[in-house]
Image (spheres, grey):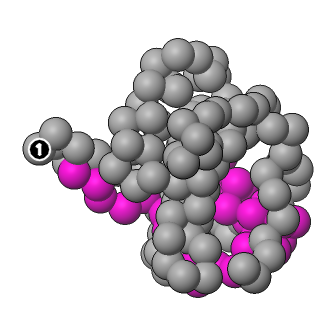
Amino acid sequence: MDNSFSLKTKLVNSKEYLFDELRKKWILSTPEELVRQRFWKYLNLEKNYPKSLIAIEKKIVINGLNKRFDLLVFDNLGKPNIIIECKSPKVKIDQSTLDQVLSYQNKVAADFIVLTNGLKTYCIKIDLQLKKVSYIKDIPEYSIK
C-alpha cells in the first residue's frame, strides 16, 4: 500500500487531528488512525471502491459486547465484501489480530479479510460455501457485479 495519500491535518492544543472524509469530522491523529485513513484512500483511489461503499469504525455487537470494526467495504448489493483490521505500524500482525478480525467476520460474513499495519498487509479470500480460506497476493479491484 502506498503511504503517500494526502491527509488534511490541523493542530489543536499541540495535538494533530486528521480530517476523515468518510465520517466528515476531525479525528485525533494516532498511528492506527493514519493507517486506517490511508487504507481507505488506497481502496478508493487505487482499487476504485466508491466512498459510498466504505464504512469506517462502526459498532458491531459480538457476544453481547460492543466492538468496532476498522473498515468494511460493501458490494453494490449492500453485502459485506471486505473487512479490514488496521493496526499501528508498531503492532505486529499476529494470531491475536487474525482472531480479532475473525470474530467480526463471523458476524458480517465478508468475502475477504484484510489485516494491515501499513507496513505489512495480508489478504485472505473466504469461500463460505466451500468453507475454504486462501491467502491472496492483493485486494481485488472494484468491479460492478
Q: Is residue 48 magenta?
A: yes
Q: Residue lying farthest left?
A: 64
Front residue (pair 145, 90): 145
Is residue 113 visible from the viewing direction of this image? no
Q: Which residues are magenta?
A: 33-61
Residue 136 vs 49, above or below: the answer is: above
Q: Which quadrant of the figure has residue 131?
A: top right
Q: Which quadrant of the figure has residue 59?
A: bottom left
Is residue 55 visible from the viewing direction of this image? yes
Q: Residue at x 46, y 19 (%)?
A: 96
Q: Which quadrant of the figure has residue 9?
A: bottom right
Q: Residue lying farthest front?
A: 130
Whole-percent x, y for residue 38 in the image? 72, 56
Q: Residue at x 70, y 54 (%)?
A: 39
The kind of secondary structure element at disc 1 is loop
Query: Where's the C terminus, which quadrant?
Result: bottom right
Q: Amino acid at mark 1?
A: Gly
Q: Is residue 15 magenta?
A: no
Front residue (pair 98, 134): 134
Residue bearing mark 1: 64
Question: In the rendered picture of this protein, how many numbered marks are placed on residues?
Answer: 1
Left or right position of 93 against 104: right
Whole-percent x, y for residue 126 in the image? 61, 43
